[in-house]
């Protein structure tokens, strides 16, 4: 994921608060993915307007963590979802 | 005391058995429910609310052809309101642009369109419905225009497996995000068409190679889910991800089933929505309890290291082929019946001329 890329959740994908299981899940066609706190924080910044580089900066500031590590984790998470057509990217 | 089962993730709502298509591998039970016995709108809406409250995330609105129900839009709106992710499993027949726009308004999340073949000649012959393919392509265009995510559901068998690559290409062309390449399962009606549908071992192997190559080539473009030809497999599929563990079905008349073919097991006793809360049926219903966990298993399953992986395979297939729903699925190479199953599959695969026995609601009941 390059810093200028703008990730977004395409139609048919949404974060759902699963009250029965007490967790957040990402709902997509034929898929329900359990979101941990990190995944949820990353997706919380995915608004279809913010470029990846800025998402990393925000997360690094909020969690007082090195931007490089955040970038690696967030890219791995989002790239994995892009491969499965659950997240899309505007170049 | 037994531990309480986890809540189900998915509900397959079989809204109706009515369908304009006549596919020779129809997965609906041999005994179809008539329109008069179908649940009314309000009861389905109650089912959706109960399902969401017990932890169901996805509802698959299926049939038959769900568009045969004039209240489909109301049902979608109700399911969304209950908090469910709504998936429409359709042949496309009965959907107009106007209806699709109404379904969009109602909050439909996803469309899964069935595909019988890659051109009109093949698809209409398999589906037994002239004009079906062209209509389907029109529906796919409307789906794309409205913006619904699209999955193609391609049922594959002897007569269309040689065109699998074109099938995958068509999914890309139609803008689908996913395709399900599902080799026919020989239950129910499909069992009458074994000679016309059973793929050869060479076809099954080639299909696997095509799927693996396409997955690599189409990463980020098309997700490919693959159900292989299990009569040619070494181990059975983990049917339903384990009986009574992840999903449940509600049949058109409200019968609550652990899987869509469960009524082929004569020893099971089923309940209907409204008899008691859906959660109660899921947690304690005798049909769900029957094959939950491992206590029901016989040898060779009971001591098999794969019993947590495939749960002994498909109970309905065990019933159909071994005459005992608690037996090892004969698809498993460790089943004593496996050699016979393979021999019969190869004999059926070798048949070159076999007519389809189509599945129509008004066809006279066949005695098998």
Image: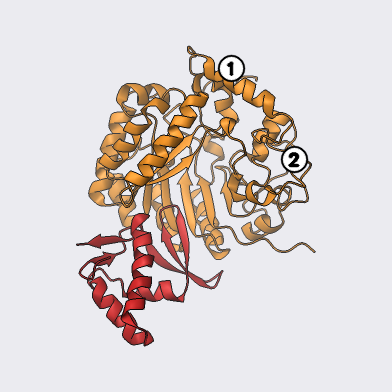
Front-most of residues B242 and B1: B242
Picture coordinates of residue B69, whole percent (x, y): 43, 42
Chain letter of the residue beneath label 2 in the structure image: B
- Marks 2/1 in contact by CB < 8 Å: the verdict is no
Front-most of residues B201 and B289: B201
Residue, disc 2: B326
Where disc 1 sits, the SS reads helix
Locate residue B310 relative to residue B104 in the image: left or right.
right
> Height in image: B70 above or below B83?
above
User: How far, Cα to Cα, is label 2 from label 1?
Assistant: 27 Å
Identify the image's colour scheme: rainbow, by chain, secondary structure or one colour: by chain
Q: How crowded is mark 1: few (under 14 residues within 10 Å), some or many (20 or more)?
A: some
Q: What is the letter of the red chain?
A: A
Q: How crowded is mark 2: few (under 14 residues within 10 Å), some or many (20 or more)?
A: many
Q: Nearer the viewer, mark 2 or mark 1?
A: 1
Q: What is the letter of the orange chain?
A: B
Q: Which residue is drawn at 53% across and 52% down?
A: B11
Residue B2 position by quadrant: bottom right
Residue, disc 1: B347
Locate residue B127 relative to residue B29 in the image: left or right.
left
Front-most of residues B252 and B60: B60
Chain letter of the residue beneath label 1 in the structure image: B
Front-most of residues B101 and A50: A50
Tell me, yes or no, whether dots 2 and 1 are on the same chain: yes
Where disc 2 sits, the SS reads loop
Asked whether the viewer can see residue B110, the reply is: yes
Locate residue B293 relative to residue A44 in the image: left or right.
right
Q: Residue at x 68, y 23 (%)?
A: B340
Picture coordinates of residue B21, whole percent (x, y): 42, 29
Q: In which quarter of the image is the N terminus of chain B?
A: bottom right
């Amino acid at each position: 994921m390059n810093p200028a890329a703008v990730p977004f959740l395409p139609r048919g994908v949404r974060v759902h608060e699963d009250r029965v299981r007490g967790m957040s899940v990402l709902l997509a066609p034929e898929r329900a993915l359990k979101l941990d706190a990190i995944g949820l924080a990353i997706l919380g910044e995915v608004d279809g307007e913010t470029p990846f580089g800025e998402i990393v900066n925000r997360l690094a500031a909020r969690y007082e963590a090195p931007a490089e590590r955040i970038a690696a984790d967030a890219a791995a998470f989002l790239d994995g979802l892009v491969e499965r057509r659950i997240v899309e990217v505007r170049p | 005391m037994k531990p309480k089962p986890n809540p189900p993730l998915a509900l397959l709502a079989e809204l109706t058995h009515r369908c304009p298509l006549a596919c020779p591998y129809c997965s609906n039970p041999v005994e179809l429910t008539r329109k008069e016995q179908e649940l009314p709108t309000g009861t389905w809406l109650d089912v959706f609310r109960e399902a969401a409250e017990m932890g169901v995330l996805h509802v698959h609105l299926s049939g038959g052809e769900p568009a045969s129900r004039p209240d489909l839009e109301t049902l979608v709106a109700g399911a969304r309101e209950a908090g469910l992710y709504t998936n429409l499993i359709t042949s496309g027949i009965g959907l107009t642009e106007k209806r699709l726009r109404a379904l969009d308004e109602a909050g439909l999340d996803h469309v899964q369109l069935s595909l019988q073949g890659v051109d009109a000649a093949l698809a209409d012959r398999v589906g037994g419905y002239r004009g079906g393919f062209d209509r389907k392509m029109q529906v796919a265009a409307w789906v794309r225009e409205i913006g619904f995510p699209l999955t193609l559901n391609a049922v594959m068998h002897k007569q269309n497996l040689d065109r699998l690559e074109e099938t995958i290409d068509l999914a890309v062309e139609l803008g689908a995000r996913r395709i399900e390449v599902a080799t026919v399962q020989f239950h129910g009606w499909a069992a009458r068409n074994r000679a016309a549908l059973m793929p050869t071992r060479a076809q099954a192997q080639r299909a696997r190679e095509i799927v693996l190559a396409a997955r690599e080539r189409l990463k980020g473009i098309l997700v490919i889910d693959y159900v292989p030809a299990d009569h040619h497999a070494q181990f059975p599929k983990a049917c339903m991800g384990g009986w009574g563990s992840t999903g449940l079905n509600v049949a058109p008349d409200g019968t609550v089933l652990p899987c869509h073919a469960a009524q082929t097991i004569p020893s099971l006793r089923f309940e209907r929505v409204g008899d008691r809360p859906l959660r109660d049926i899921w947690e304690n219903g005798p049909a769900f309890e029957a094959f939950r966990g491992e206590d029901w298993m016989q040898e060779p399953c009971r001591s098999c290291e794969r019993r947590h992986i495939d749960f002994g395979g498909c109970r309905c297939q065990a019933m159909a082929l071994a005459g005992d729903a608690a037996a090892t699925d004969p698809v498993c190479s460790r089943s004593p019946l496996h050699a016979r199953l393979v021999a019969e599959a190869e004999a059926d695969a070798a048949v070159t001329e076999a007519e389809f026995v189509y599945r129509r609601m008004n066809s006279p009941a066949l005695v098998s």
